[in-house]
Image (spheres, coloured by chain):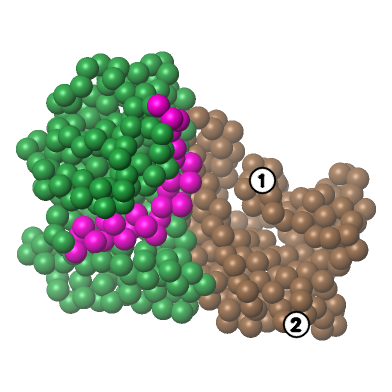
Chain colours: A green, B brown
C-alpha cells in the first residue's frame, strides 16, 4: 500500500472473512446485472482478497479478468480463492491504481468495487482507469455509503459510533460517504452516459439471513472493529461506544429494522 | 380533524398542488405493484385530497374503492378530482379512522398511504383497520421516512432544517420516521406475512424530472413550508434556516444528488 491510506478496516483474517461473507450475502443485490461478453478483456481494479473477483469471473465465464491490487498479500489470498473455485479466466497482477502498467485503451471494460472509498485521490484514479479503457467500453463502480444507514429503534449512541467509522476513514484520506457522489465523480472524470442505481439493503426479522449476514456480521462488525482506535483517538468515550454497539445489535432483534445503501454506477467512454 | 393532530403540512392550496405533484412523480415507484381484482371492495383509509385515490381507482378499474377521510374539505377536493378524471368506481365517505363506521370484515383489502405518519396512535388505527378487513385480505401501508434523507454536497445546516420538520411533526404527535418501523407496527397489529419493500428515490442531474419534481418541489418545498413555525418555536435560528434551505436547493444543481426512501408494506389477515 505505497500510495494509499492505511485501510480503516485492515487486513486481519477476520476482516477477510467479513469481506467474503459480505460478498456472499449481497451478491445478488450488487451483481444481478454484472456480466461481460465472451472474449472481452476486463480490468478489475483493486481486487483486494478476491471477494468480488469470484463473482466477476463466474458471471463472465467467457471473458478474461485482469485483477490488480497494490497489496501482495491480498493478491495471494485472491489468487488462492479463485483457484480453489476452479476458475481459470482471471489473471492477477500487482499494480498501483495511480500508476497502471497498461497502455491506453487496453481494456474493453473496467470494474471497480469497494475501492474508491479508500482512496485519497479518487478523481485521479478514475482518470487513470478511463485512460486504459477502450472507447465504447464501460466503467462500473460500486461503493457503499455509511451515511445511508438508519435503523429502528433509533439510537443517538449508535449514530455516534457509526460517525467514528466515518471520521476515521476521513482522517485516513478516504470517504465512506462516497456512494452518493459517484455521479458527479464520474461526470468529472470525463465519462458519459453515467447511470447510477442505488442498491438498498433493507433488513427486518422476516429475513434472518440478512439480519445475521448484513446487520450483525457485516455492518455492526465493521463498526465494532474500529472501537479501540476510535476511543484511543478521542472520538468517543468508552461508555457511549459500548452503548452504540449494543444499540446496533439491538436493531437485529425481532422488532428491529436496518437500512443501508450501496450505489452502482455504469458509465461509458466515447 | 377531530381526533387527529393538526397536520404539519396543512391544507393550503399550494400544499394540495404539492401532494398531487408528488403523486404524479412517484406513481410508478410506489404503485407499479398496486392493483386489486375486479369485484373486490377496497377501503382507502385517509384519502386526503385524493392524490393516491386517482391512482388506486385507475389501477383497479374493476374494484370499488371506498375512500374515507376525517376532513370534509379534503374529501370535497378528492371527490372533484376523481370526478374530473371520469372515474366512477370510488365512493367517498367522511369517517374517523379510530371510529370506523363499518362492520367487522367488510373489506376485501385495505390501503393506507401517507397517513400513519400523522397519527398519534398508529397502532390503534391499524387495529381498527384490521378489524374491518376480511380474513384472507391484504392491508397495504405506504409511508415515507424523513430520516432516510441524505444528499451531496453534505450540509449540516440542511440537516438541521430537516430535523425541524421531524421535530415539529413529533410535537404534533406524529412520526415522520415511521417508514422504517412499518414491519414491527404491522406485526404488532396482528397482521401476518408482513413484507416490507423500500422504494428509494435517488436523484441526480440525469433525471431532471426528479430534480425538479422531487428534490425541489416535493421535499425541499415541504421543509421550506415549516420555516416560520420552526423559527417561531425556537427550533432553529433564521440564519441557519436560510442556509439549510439554500443548501437543500444546492443539491439540485448539476453535481448534486439527493436520496429519500419510502416504504411499502403488504400484510395479510388470517
From the top left corner, tell me how far across and down residue B89 is, in percent. Answer: 90, 56
Inter-mark Cα distance, 2 to 1: 30 Å
Majority SS type along the magenta span: helix
**Which chain is indicated by disc 1?**
B
Residue at the image point whose x is 48% and y is 46% from the top: A32
- Looking at the rendered structure, the secondary structure element under dot 1 is helix
Left-right relation of A221 to A32: left
Q: Which one is earlier in the sequence, the residue at label 2 or at label 1? A: 1
Residue at the image point whose x is 44% and y is 57% from the top: A201
Left-right relation of B149 to A52: right
- Looking at the rendered structure, the secondary structure element under dot 2 is helix
Nearest the eye: B130 or B196: B196
From the top left corner, tell me how far across and down residue B148 is, in percent. Answer: 45, 56
The residue that mark 1 highlights is B28
From the top left corner, tell me how far across and down residue B166 is, in percent. Answer: 47, 61
Query: What segment is highlighted magenta in the picture?
Result: A14-39
Amino acid at each position: 500500500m505505497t500510495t494509499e491510506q492505511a485501510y480503516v478496516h485492515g487486513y486481519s483474517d477476520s476482516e477477510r472473512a467479513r469481506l467474503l461473507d459480505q460478498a456472499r450475502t449481497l451478491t445478488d443485490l450488487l451483481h444481478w446485472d454484472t456480466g461481460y461478453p465472451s472474449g472481452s478483456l476486463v480490468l478489475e481494479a483493486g481486487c483486494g482478497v478476491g471477494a468480488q473477483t469470484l463473482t466477476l469471473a463466474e458471471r463472465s465465464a467467457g471473458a478474461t479478468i485482469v485483477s490488480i491490487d497494490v497489496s501482495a498479500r491480498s493478491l495471494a489470498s485472491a489468487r488462492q480463492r479463485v483457484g480453489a473455485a476452479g476458475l481459470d479466466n482471471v489473471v492477477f497482477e500487482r499494480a498501483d491504481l495511480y500508476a497502471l502498467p497498461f497502455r491506453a485503451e487496453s481494456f474493453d471494460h473496467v470494474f471497480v468495487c469497494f475501492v474508491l472509498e479508500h482512496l485519497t485521490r479518487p478523481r485521479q484514479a478514475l482518470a487513470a482507469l478511463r485512460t486504459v479503457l477502450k472507447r465504447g467500453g464501460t466503467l462500473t463502480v460500486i461503493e457503499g455509503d455509511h451515511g445511508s444507514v438508519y435503523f429502528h429503534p433509533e439510537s443517538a449512541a449508535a449514530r455516534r459510533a457509526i460517525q467514528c467509522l466515518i471520521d476515521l476513514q476521513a482522517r485516513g484520506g478516504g470517504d465512506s460517504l462516497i456512494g452518493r457522489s459517484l455521479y458527479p465523480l464520474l461526470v468529472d472524470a470525463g465519462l458519459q452516459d453515467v447511470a447510477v442505481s442505488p442498491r438498498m439493503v433493507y433488513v427486518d426479522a422476516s429475513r434472518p439471513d440478512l439480519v445475521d449476514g448484513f446487520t450483525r456480521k457485516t455492518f455492526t462488525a465493521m463498526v465494532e472493529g474500529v472501537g479501540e482506535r476510535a476511543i484511543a483517538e478521542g472520538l468517543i468515550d468508552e461508555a457511549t461506544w459500548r452503548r452504540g454497539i449494543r444499540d446496533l445489535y439491538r436493531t437485529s432483534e425481532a422488532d428491529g429494522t436496518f437500512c443501508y445503501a450501496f450505489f452502482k454506477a455504469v458509465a461509458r467512454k466515447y
